[in-house]
């Protein structure tokens, strides 16, 4: 490159300045084209990333809805189990106490009849 510039300077400063100006203009044009293509690629990347994020959000919302539905079903099953089994245990505890009192009641009735005789 230096050799080319030295040969141009041998013809005078004006042709060398014209060639250097042309080269600088060409370099600036190429830089602008590269910047424009970079902007286009950045915009395309933003769009594709946005699309992927939207798809991930929709899948996440679907999964959360499914998990929430499953959680509601399990909560309903737990409440049914609590209704079916816990009151039965309490019922048996309470009923066993009444059973003992009923047995004593029949003994009391028998003893009352025996006393009357």
Image (tube, rainbow, N blue to C red):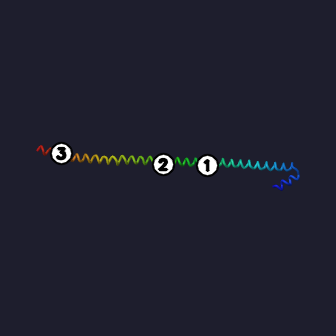
> Residue at 86% across / 49% down in the picture?
13
Count residues near mark 3 (Cα–Cα under 10 Å), then give few for <14, some for 14-19, many for 20+. few
x, y percent for residue 115: 12, 44
Residue beneath label 3, please? 108
x, y percent for residue 34: 72, 50
Q: Residue 33's mark? A: none
Comparing 76 with 4, the one in front is: 4
Residue that protrudes farthest toward the right in the picture: 11
Horizontal relation, residue 10 to residue 103: left or right: right
Q: CA distance from mark 3 to mark 1?
A: 86 Å
Count residues near mark 2 (Cα–Cα under 10 Å), then give few for <14, some for 14-19, many for 20+. few
Comparing 7 with 73, the one in front is: 7
- Dot 3: element: helix
- Dot 1: element: helix
Q: Confirm or deny contact between disc 3 and disc 1 (CB under 8 A).
A: no
The quadrant in which the N terminus is found is: bottom right
Residue beneath label 2, please? 67
């Amino acid at each position: 490159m230096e050799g080319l510039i030295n040969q141009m300077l041998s013809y005078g400063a004006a042709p060398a300045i014209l060639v250097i100006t042309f080269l600088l203009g060409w370099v600036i044009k190429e830089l602008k084209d590269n910047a424009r293509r970079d902007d286009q690629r950045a915009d395309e990347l933003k769009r594709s990333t946005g699309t992927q994020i939207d798809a991930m959000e929709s899948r996440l919302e679907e999964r959360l809805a499914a998990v929430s539905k499953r959680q509601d079903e399990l909560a309903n099953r737990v409440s049914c189990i609590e209704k079916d089994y816990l009151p039965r245990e309490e019922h048996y505890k309470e009923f066993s106490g009444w059973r003992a009192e009923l047995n004593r009641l029949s003994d009391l009735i028998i003893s009352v009849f025996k006393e009357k005789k």
